[in-house]
Image (cartoon, grey):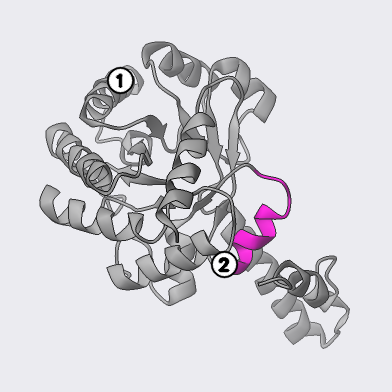
Amino acid sequence: MDKQVQVERAVRFRALHDRRQVLLLPNAWDAGSARAFADLGFSAIATTSAGVAWSLGYADGERTPLAEVVGATRRIAHATALPVSADFESGYGETPAAVAASVRAVIEAGVAGINLEDGVRHATLREVEDAAERIAAARAAAQALGVPIVINARIDLWLIGAGANAAERFDEAVRRAHAYLAAGADCIYPIGLADRNTIAALTAAIDAPLNVGARPDLPDLAELGRLGVARVSTATRLATLALSAAREAARALRSGGRFDVLDAPFGYTDMQQLFAHD
């Protein structure tokens, strides 16, 4: 991707976090899903690490080789003119220096932003100082390349918990958010959080855009805007929805032998048309 084009996309993506309206991000897992979502009029697109991993034949949790993640991300970024933010898990590196090298690689793939999480494979939490150093390394890598990416710092307390009660979890989330912002993050993502009161309290306690993950029990977009949320991403939800629909159609086909389950409102011709001018 042309460097100036990428910088312009990163600047545009950053402007979408001004908190005047909620930024809604569909998470793509390959070039086809990215092109299909872009056609619907979204302002930007993110990737889903799990969806990308599954499409490449791996489980989620940084089990996919970095080169394959970067390759898939490059194809997604080149499939659309929209800014693309990469779900980059915990940075693909054991040390901050290794994270910086990995972040440079994914920036060079054409992204306008990245997610970095402070959990390790949904099992444990990094110490806040460690997670902050990794964010600082990612910011330094972006500055060295001259691309003002948006760093979305994911806080995994609501996934992992670490035995904390609700008040302790909230206080720890605020502490981590402040540390991550000081290290160079732009946006805070308390994944797994859906409670209205806690969301409102976090937006009041953190002077930065707040990202929440879409889920069936989440308040609707209008209410999230009133609560102060700046950004909503779909995480794995669209990928699992697509796979679920295909799986159920295959199940019905196998059990009933009928082909009417293969009728789709968006078919081959429609998808081909999205790539017609490439």
Q: Is residue 236 above or below residue 269?
A: above
Relative image position of residue 40 (x, y in whole percent): 73, 50
- Quarter of image, res 37: bottom right
Residue 103 vs residue 195, the one in the foreground: 103
CA separation in Å, label 2 and label 1: 36 Å
Q: Nearer the viewer, mark 2 or mark 1?
A: 2
Answer with left or right where residue 264 lies relative to residue 237: right
Q: Position of residue 97 (x, y in %)?
A: 11, 51
Q: Quadrant of the C terminus?
A: bottom right
- In the image, what residue occupies the spot 82% across and 75% down? 269
Callout 1 amino acid: Val
> Does 219 sit left or right of 189 as displayed?
right
Coordinates of residue 31 in the picture (x, y in percent): 57, 67
Q: Report the residue marked by disc 1.
A: 174
One can see residue 59 in this view? no
The one nearer the camera, 128 or 140, is 140
Which residue is label 2 attached to? 31
